[in-house]
Amino acid sequence: MENKKIDSQVEIIGPGASEVTDFKTMEDIVVPGLDIESNLDHNLISELEEKIESKKEEIKNKVYAVTMTEDLFGKYEHFIKNDAEWAGTEALGVREISKQIDKIVKEGGVKNSVVFMGALPLEASHYFLSKVKGTGLKSAENFISLYKAFDQALNDAKNDAREIRDLEKDLTAAMQGISPE
């Protein structure tokens, strides 16, 4: 601020006043980049939503091949029905896996060194196998052969789940008007 002396009176001059009397409201102000709606690709959003639903439906009914011999399947059945450790509601998982095993047996058991399982019983079987404790080489060898069969099949199921997560990330980006890359 600057002071001026006029006829022995001091006049204080403040900041300059605006000559505009009609001020804009926040709704009237245009800020570049805030108009997300104009950046949305509605076709891409619809396409991604359809892909996600389609993939989820595919996975819901998809079965995964677990490579094993009749002997290995017998060990798996014995493990689930007699040795799988569980706590609390994990008992439900053991019961559901046992139902899946009974279904496989009813349908003829191992065919061409393969049994087929849905993602949920496959993941649950892998979970219970991963908790196994044992002693000695023979026990270790039995565990490894059974664990490997389920681990390989589980990788396929995880790849499908990862594909859905990637599509969901792309959808989130598209809904925010940004490029998914």
Image (cartoon, helix red, strand yellow):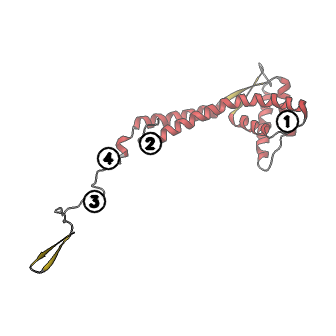
What amino acid is at disc 2? Met
Q: Residues within 10 Å of mark 2 (few under 14, many from 20)?
A: some
Q: Earlier in the sequence, mark 2 or mark 1?
A: 1
**Horizontal arrangement in the rendering, residue 38 relative to residue 56 (left or right):** left
The Cα atoms of the two marked residues, 3 and 1, are separated by 71 Å
The mark closer to the camera, 3 or 4, is: 4
Q: In the figure, 10 relative to 158: above or below?
A: below
Tag 2 near tag 1, CB within 8 Å: no
Residue ID for mark 1: 79
Residue ID for mark 2: 175
Tag 3 near tag 1, CB within 8 Å: no
The mark closer to the camera, 1 or 4, is: 4
Q: In the figure, 27 relative to 17: above or below?
A: above
Residue ID for mark 3: 25
Q: Residue 32 carries which label?
A: 4
Q: Which of marks 3 and 1 is nearer the N terminus?
A: 3
Q: In which quarter of the image is residue 14?
A: bottom left
- Residue 74, position as x, y percentages in the image: 85, 29
The Cα atoms of the two marked residues, 2 and 4, are separated by 18 Å
